[in-house]
């Protein structure tokens, strides 16, 4: 039979590692969001295309990390989960629309990115509340 103290320590380490991975994915997403916004503002189509691809890949990684490493473990309240789910749908629509484009329409991406950034800001606040309440 396993040692309960050892099992608790292993679970705590898994939780810390999962939270760190999730936080890293979120930070990378924010970095690409800022870089993409700057390249769009400058009208740099080629650079915007490259960063848009990395941003969309990072967006999917972030959503996956949140779902599999955080929300399945912490199990948010029903209203929190509904809010997370709605932001996931908005983010996936962005990815579906722009994740594999041949040519960047700077104006179109800029408008969609601004809307996504607002949605992500709301989601970040909710995630922070969920993570903080789990440590309570």
Image (tube, helix red, strand yellow):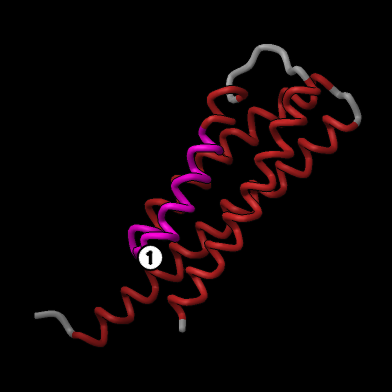
Residue at the extreme left? 1
- Asked if residue 110 is positioned above or below residue 19 in the image, the reply reads above
Q: In the figure, is residue 16 to the left or right of 101?
A: left
| Label 1: few (<14), some (14–19) or many (≥20) C-alpha neighbours in 10 Å | few
- Asked if residue 128 is positioned above or below residue 33 in the image, the reply reads below
The residue to which callout 1 is attached is 77
Return the x and y of residue 56 as percentages of the image width and height: 60, 33
Residue at the extreme bottom? 5
Q: Tag 1's secondary structure?
A: loop
Magenta region, residue range: 70-92
What residue do we see at 37% from left, 68% from top? 14
Residue at the extreme top? 102
Return the x and y of residue 86 as percentages of the image width and height: 48, 45
Residue at the extreme front? 79
What residue do we see at 37% from left, 76% from top? 12
Q: In the figure, is residue 102 to the left or right of 65?
A: right
Return the x and y of residue 120 as percentages of the image width and height: 62, 49
The quarter of the picture where the N terminus appears is bottom left
**Main SS class of the magenta portion in the image:** helix
Q: Hey, which quadrant is residue 43 in on the image?
A: top right
Query: How many labels sit on residues?
Result: 1
């Amino acid at each position: 039979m396993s040692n309960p103290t050892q099992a608790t320590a292993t679970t705590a380490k898994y939780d810390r590692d999962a939270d760190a991975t999730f936080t890293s994915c979120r930070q990378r997403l924010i970095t690409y969001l800022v870089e993409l916004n700057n390249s769009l503002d400058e009208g740099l189509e080629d650079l915007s295309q490259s960063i848009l691809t990395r941003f969309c890949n990072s967006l999917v990684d972030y959503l996956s990390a949140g779902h599999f490493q955080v929300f399945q473990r912490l199990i948010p309240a029903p209203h929190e989960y509904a809010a997370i789910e709605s932001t996931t749908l908005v983010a996936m629509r962005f990815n579906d629309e722009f994740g594999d484009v041949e040519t960047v329409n700077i104006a179109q991406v800029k408008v969609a990115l601004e809307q996504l950034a607002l949605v992500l800001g709301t989601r970040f606040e909710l995630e922070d509340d969920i993570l903080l309440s789990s440590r309570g």
